């Protein structure tokens, strides 16, 4: 299953890193966070729910998709309560997994845009060249999407 997922995501242009155990993945998260994590609920060593909890403690906005071949109501509820982005019971269609990952990426991009909008400061002064309504709109939009504007 891991090989099929890795091959599919690489073909779609994703940079994929595989880990056989959760502890190694947690150590990697200290240095480099991915856009999305797919993990099984049952793994050797640290189980998927414990892994999810540890990820959410350090990276609360990181989408984690929990996969399992042993789907039951209790594990699904526990996954969501712990912060899973989605719960994916096996067997699943590879296109479904791809769609979930794409949805998770859209979700994190939306969160990042919202955060950028919150931290962007509106233009303090209109005493700049280009006071037409069209230029003012450009300045406002630039302030929303960029942290720094250079005018020459």
Image (tube, helix red, strand yellow):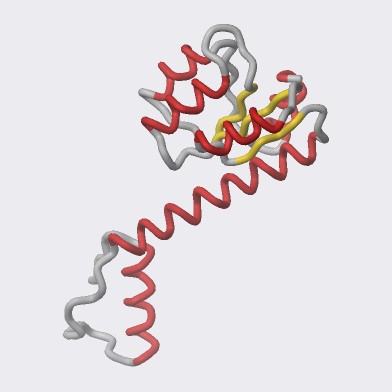
Would you say 149 lies left or right of 25 here?
left
Tell me the residue at 50%/34% (across/down): 82
Q: Is residue 125 above or below residue 148?
A: below
Tell me the residue at 55%/11% (across/down): 21
Residue 59, quarter of the rendered image: top left
Q: Is residue 43 visible?
A: yes
Residue placed farthest to the front in the image? 74
Tell me the residue at 36%/91% (across/down): 133
Q: Is residue 35 visible?
A: no
Which corner quadrant holds the C terminus?
bottom left
Residue placed farthest to the bottom in the image? 132
Would you say 132 lies left or right of 9 here?
left
Q: Is residue 22 above or below residue 121?
A: above
- Residue 96 is situated, as x and y percent measured from the top left of the image, at 77, 41
Q: How many marks?
A: 0
**Nearest the eye: 66 or 78:** 78
Residue 40, quarter of the rendered image: top right
Which corner quadrant holds the N terminus?
top right
- Residue 44 is situated, as x and y percent measured from the top left of the image, at 59, 7
Residue 4, quarter of the rendered image: top right
Q: Is residue 47 above or below residue 74?
A: above
- Residue 128 is situated, as x and y percent measured from the top left of the image, at 20, 82
Would you say 138 lies left or right of 127 here?
right
- Residue 26 is situated, as x and y percent measured from the top left of the image, at 44, 19
**Nearest the eye: 50 or 108:** 50
């Amino acid at each position: 299953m891991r090989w099929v997922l890795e091959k599919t995501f690489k073909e779609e242009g994703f940079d994929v890193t595989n880990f056989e155990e959760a502890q190694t993945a947690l150590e990697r998260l200290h240095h480099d966070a991915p856009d999305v994590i797919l993990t099984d609920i049952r793994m050797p060593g640290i189980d998927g729910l414990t892994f999810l909890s540890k990820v959410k403690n350090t990276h609360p906005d990181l989408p984690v998709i929990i996969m399992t071949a042993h789907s039951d109501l209790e594990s699904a509820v526990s996954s969501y309560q712990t912060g899973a982005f989605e719960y994916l019971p096996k067997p699943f269609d590879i296109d479904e997994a791809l769609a979930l990952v794409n949805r998770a990426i859209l979700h994190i991009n939306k969160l990042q845009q919202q955060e950028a909008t919150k931290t962007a400061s509106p233009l303090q002064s209109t005493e700049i060249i280009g006071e037409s309504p069209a230029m003012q709109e450009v300045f406002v939009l630039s302030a929303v999407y960029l942290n720094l504007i250079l005018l020459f």
